[in-house]
Amino acid sequence: MAFYPIPNTAPFGQEEIAILNRVVGPATPIQRAWLAGFLAGLDAAATGAAAAATGAHAAAVAAPQPAAPAQPTEPLTILYATESGNSERLASDMAKAARKMGFKPSVVDMADLEMAALASVKRLVVIAATWGEGDPPARAIRAYGELMGEGAPRLDGVEFGVLALGDTAYTEFCAIGKKLDARLEALGAKRVADRVDCDLDFEEPAAKWIEGALKALAPEDADRSRVIAVDFGAKAAPAADLGPVEAEIIELIDLNSSRSGKETYHVELSFDGATPAYKPGDSLDLYPENDPAYVEDFLKAAGLAADSALRTELTKSRDITTLSLKAVETYAAETGHRYVKELLDSGGAKDWIVGRQLIDLVLQFPIALTADHVRKVTRTLAPRAYSIASSRSEVGEEAHLLISAVRYESFGRARKGVASGYVADQLKKGQRIKVKLRPNKHFALPAPDQDIIMVGPGTGIAPFRAFVQERRATSATGKSWLFFGDRQFTHDFLYQLDWQNAVKDGSLTRMDVAFSRDTPEKVYVQNRMWEKRRDLIEWLDKGAYFYVCGDAKAMAKDVRSTLVRAYADVKGLGAEAAEKAVSDLDRAHRYLQDTY
Amino acid sequence: MTKELSRNERIKEASAYLRGTLAEGLREKITGAIIEEDQQLVKFHGMYLQDDRDLRPERGKKKMEKAFAFMLRLRIPGGVCTPAQFLHLHEVACTYGNRTMRLTTRQTFQLHGIIKSNLKATMREIDEALLTTIAACGDVNRNVMCNPNPYQSRAHAAAYATAKAISDHLLPRTPAYREIWLDGERIAGGEEEVVEPIYGKTYLPRKFKTVVAVPPSNDVDVYAHDLGYIAILDADGDVKGYNVTVGGGMGMTHGEPETFPRTADVMGFCTPEQAVAVAEAVVTVQRDWGDRVERKHARLKYTIEDRGLAAFRAEVEKRSGVKLGQPKPFTFDSTGDRYGWTESEDGNGHLTLFVQNGRLRDIPGGPQWLTGLRQIAEMHDGDFRLTANQNIIIANVAPDKRWDIGKLVEKHKLTADASPVRRNSMACVALPTCGLALAESERFLPDLITEVEERLASHGLTDDEIIVRMTGCPNGCARPYLAEIGLVGTGPGKYNLYLGAAFDGSRLSKLYAEELDHKGIVAALDPIFAAYKSERNEGERFGDYAIRAGFVAQTGNGPDFHNDTGAKRTA
Ligand code: SRM
Ligand SMILES: Cc1cc2nc3c(=O)[nH]c(=O)nc-3n(C[C@H](O)[C@H](O)[C@H](O)COP(=O)(O)OP(=O)(O)OC[C@H]3O[C@@H](n4cnc5c(N)ncnc54)[C@H](O)[C@@H]3O)c2cc1C
Ligand SMILES: Cc1cc2nc3c(=O)[nH]c(=O)nc-3n(C[C@H](O)[C@H](O)[C@H](O)COP(=O)(O)O)c2cc1C
Ligand code: SF4
């Protein structure tokens, strides 16, 4: 688009003109329209014309109104598919930016997406995370299925762009974003912004993509006389306290018996500053450090043991355990290692990395490495999320976590999880750690008079301890029913005494347990659900909310399919009708999951 | 005015014939326990609620209740069971139990570590094996013991028949057992009609134990039980009747001299046909005369002390209609088992194996009891017999099977040859399962015996048979007061040492030294061993010697047990 410099005749000084040119010159039509509106509004305000302006922005102090009539702004649909909230946050960030640029954004959770509505969309942005092993986030499953199926509407003429969130540690990296991107095109939509696949450190690339996408989606050469209404009254949204904070560990106990094969740590945190305003259902991001022993081995393997600065950096802030295809590629590219290249070319790398860690790569394919190589091959060490196992209304300025130690052996090496290992082996009572609140409004308690059913085997029990504490503290009237499972009744019954007390004082109406290793045939929570299916369906018919937390790979799926079978059996429904009964719960936001 | 009945009496009264709220308690899924009242009642069903005391310290911290689990005690009259039954129990122990089987001092099996949620399944398995746990514990007539004596097969057959008959006749009749554990069907109004012709609503004041002995073996320790039958054999080895004994018992409480062990008195003689009627009469007299106010004074031995033997005998004769005859002469030689192979008149072989403290398990590098006995049971068509010394007999092995079984026994190290003193030692269960244990027993005795062996060897006494028994508390489950060397726990790592009991089980011991620790025990015994070696008469037993040499005073009977205690001589 042509550039009309501000004439020297303008009532400004030379360098003011220069400055203006620098700003107005490259400004997009929308930006220019906004400026016009802004100036007009200012004048209007100055001449007190705003006194006439009523109603609309009553809250605004003398909200100036644009002199020129505002054009209808450009609609933009921002669709997100999220499990742990990242995509959702990015969606609302994008909406803010879009509003600034004159779009009229509407942010839609994929959980609520109706296919019919989709066809009428003009501009579509999709921010989608991938979960499980290349699966959509639980809440998005229904809509995703419909969009992928024959039932999906044609989207000819729709302009779109996709931002994919993922984790290179998973083989199905950003699978869902990729599939949606391809699908929208297949349905006739026009890609105006190329997809970007983000790793765990997504903030920067995501921000870039949003900026670019908004530019691309902006109407090409909009009528230059356009003026955008500028709302001088709009107040800045209150900044949620989401920054990392320091907390002291005031309790750290392995809840499993000394005879158990598992370690699950109950961690009590007390906060130096203000306690994050968490609600039952929220999680905390915990910022771990790498295992000193592992760091040592790694530095030795890399021949960099002497670099103490690097040692600190790796310990505190680099992910030196995850071995992703990307890491292997970078390693090959940076070091030019012949055999690694061969491994990649042969296509064998994808399988080779399974069960291995970065140190295996360095050990198996040694080569002179620099600190810089290491930085390039690794990504920043990401925090781990842990459901909060307490309610502030009961524990006050504390937050409790329940952390299961990940330990396993692979390729002759004893391995441990970075964060859970950090908690289990490095941290002691009295030490401090960094955590960040990770709100999850999609896994919150319903009104106090609503009944709730909670299914939480293993560490999935954590948020339900918060739920029950909250309901006790607020003497909620709704009934509650908890399903818990683990290996052995005697050695793995997490928080057993808490549950016994809760049942005594009525804050927990009923509890069923399944222990897989107490009997010859394994018993899981879904088996108990099946035994109790009549009561289950009765509770749900009476409006109970259904919560599932814990393992996403097997448990969450089994629980869901069990509930479907329960509907079929109890109500004599066909497979489809039963499936619908459960997805109706989804839509009504009464089937809530927090699985990992 | 009569004093208030003991709490247990009220629990029994209110239990509707042992039902209590057991059925409801089993449905409570988030606790491994049952309520206090039911804990008392469940004993009558053959089980105890226990908790793993090794884990107690950590449980609270970990927000878990005590590590509760049940101990099941089988009821196996005379300790005789079939290979099929053994295999069934073996299976249960490995599936639901703690992968061990415990041979008890009263000829039966105990299974430990069964959690509440598995109780019913376990009880069903046991029922399928045609076995039961009914009345293996509780205030009733317990498992009836009988000398397993295979080498006098005819006498044993008769004695066993008597034991079985008494056991069956004195079984509780309440339907509660089948109802709660097996059928699940509550017989309507079941608690109303009189279901217990012999016991009544409140059963006995206390536990009641019956045994049948076949001289010359006193392996069942006939003097330690409430009711005993000593078989009197005629010239050709047939049982022509029994001397009846009453009022034996071991249990006492430290620091309460009014509680004491007591050896039974011989009350008279009866024919085999009269044995059951006499048993019923003894039970009903104890039912009506026994102390229901003070449980520590409720055993038959105290009833006999208080009422006198003559009065008791008269009442028994009145109720049974049996005129008891003059006791016949008999002699016991020992309370121990005869190890190794023996052969009976019918030519069958019988192999008695020493099981240290009765604990059947696969010991790394040692005897593979579970595996070995399972493989034997799979091919054996005779029977198994448990002895009162916590040992097991592979009985009635047909001549053609003998070699194969011998091979299996060797393969699984089931005859790890133990020294005479070890073979004559017993320890009760105690920690970690026994809720009453004050000190270790089963887990400590083996090491102590090793040191005793060294001491004996140093004095050239290796081949001497000396009876050593240890218990973790004064209740006396391994009958320590009838051992030549008795060790009774008083607190962690501390034991009282008793000496001077008779080798044949006819005389109680006397307290020699108190509160000895591991070293103290060995130090106290060593000089006595030395003296025994140099001063003993030809064939003089260690227990008899301890008295003659003046180390301890001789104990007359029960009430005399606490008199004149302490070391009379130190070396
Ligand atoms: C398993 C066994 C010891 C062993 O190592 O074999 C045993 C184990 C227990 N005895 Fe016993 N008694 C065992 C034979 C005895 C004997 C020996 C005998 O009967 O020949 C006695 C001494 C004789 C007597 O009864 O006086 C005996 C006298 C006691 C007493 C004290 C009774 C008394 O009147 O003073 C108690 C405590 C009680 O009853 O209050 C007791 C209580 C117990 C309990 C059930 C503890 C409890 O009440 O909570 C022990 C369970 C421990 C465990 O974890 O297994 N046990 N108990 C024996 C099982 C016998 C059976 O199969 O029925
Ligand atoms: C919203 C949310 C809530 C969560 N809440 C909880 C909670 O309350 N409690 C809790 O304990 N966890 C919870 N998690 C999981 C937690 O965030 C971490 O993923 C978990 O603790 C592992 O992290 P780590 O750093 O210890 O292990 P990492 O260093 O991340 O290692 C884990 C990786 O190790 C590999 N691995 C693990 N086991 C094996 C094996 N057997 N064989 C081969 N490879 C293996 C896998 O690649 C796995 O991804 C939650 C997760 C989310 C997203
Ligand atoms: C249990 C679990 C499974 C995951 N599976 C995948 C996967 O298969 N592929 C992938 O690229 N990312 C995967 N991720 C990473 C997430 O997509 C990533 O954390 C993303 O930022 C989450 O976005 P959200 O908060 O919007 O759900 C997984 C994360 C978790 C915790
Ligand atoms: S003697 Fe005492 S410690 Fe030993 S088993 Fe009997 S009651 Fe328990």
Image (tube, rainbow, N blue to C red):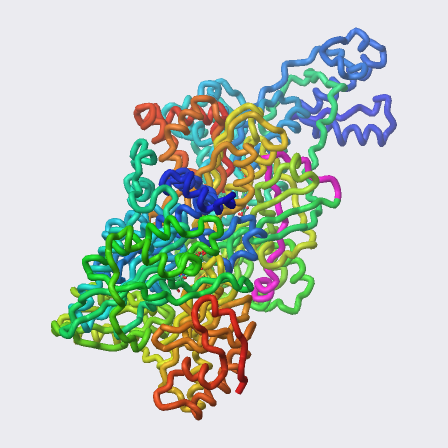
Q: Magenta stretch: residue B72 in it?
A: no
Q: Is residue A393 left or right of residue A254?
A: right
Q: In percent of the image, x 46 and y 44: which residue is there?
A: B37
Q: Quadrant of residue A232?
A: top right
Q: Can residue A525 be seen by looking at this rendering?
A: no
Image height check: is A93 above or below A424? above
In x, y percent, where is residue B10? 45, 42
Q: Quadrant of residue A285?
A: top right
Q: Quadrant of the N terminus of chain A?
A: top right
Q: Which segment did they paint magenta? A: A273-298
In x, y percent, where is residue A411? 44, 63
Q: Magenta stretch: residue A278 in it?
A: yes
Q: Is residue A229 left or right of residue B107?
A: right
Q: Can residue B322 be seen by looking at this rendering?
A: yes
Question: Which one is nearer the viewer's eye here, A17 or A574?
Answer: A574
Image height check: is A196 above or below B429? above
In x, y percent, where is residue B429? 42, 64
Q: Quadrant of residue A29?
A: top right
Q: In percent of the image, x 49 and y 54: which residue is there?
A: A262
